[in-house]
Image: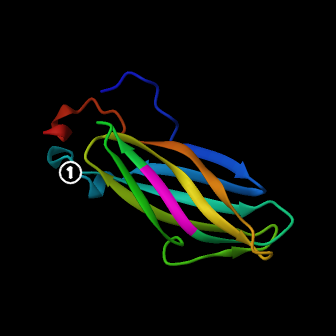
Amino acid sequence: MPSAPIAQPTSSAVTQGVRVTVRAQYLPEQSAPGLERFVFAYTVTIANEGTAPVQLRTRHWIITDGAGKVEEVKGDGVVGEQPRLAPGQRFQYTSGCVLGTPVGAMHGTYQMYRDDGSWFDAEIAAFSLAMPQTTDRSMLN
C-alpha cells in the first residue's frame, strides 16, 4: 500500500457561494474483501450560501483506487434529480461506489447554472474511501 497520507473521509469546499460537504463510510455488510470488493457510501450536502438561486445540472466524479486505477463518472444530475437551490437552501443525498482495493479517494465537480444563464463548476474536494483497519486478519481471507 502507498505510504502517502490519505485524505480524510470528509471534505468541504465552497465555490461561488455553493458549499459541497461530503462524508464517506465503509459498508462491511456489502463488501467481500476476499473477492476484492470494497463498498463505500458517501453522503453529500450541497448548500447555497450565495445570494442567487443555482441549479445542479451535471456531475463529474474522479474515483481513484489504491492501485492508482482511475474511473471517471459523468452524468446529468444526482440520484435522478437536478436540484434547484434558492439562497439558504440545501440538498442532501447518499450514493455509493465499489472499489477493488480497501482504500481509494474521490473528488470532482458539479456544474451549477444560474437564472441568468451563467454557470460554474462547484468543487467537490477530495475525500478518502478506506476500510477500517482490523487486527482480525481472517476478514481478509
The amino acid type of the residue labelled 1 equals Ala
**Residue lying farthest front?**
117
Task: Please provide the residue range marked out in magenta.
Answer: 58-62
Vertical relation: 31 (above or below) 82: above
Q: Which percent across, then down, holds residue 128? A: 46, 41
Residue receiving disc 1: 32
Dominant SS type (magenta): strand
Let me know if residue 130 appears in the view.
Answer: no
Q: Is residue 51 left or right of residue 12?
A: right
Camera-side residue of 74 and 38: 74
The residue tagged with tag 1: helix, strand or loop? loop
Picture residue at 62% right of the left edge, 64% below the top: 111
Q: Which percent across, then down, holds residue 131? A: 35, 41
Let me know if residue 125 appears in the view.
Answer: yes
Picture residue at 70% right of the left edge, 55% below the top: 19
Vertical relation: 27 (above or below) 9: below
Q: Is residue 73 left or right of residue 118?
A: left
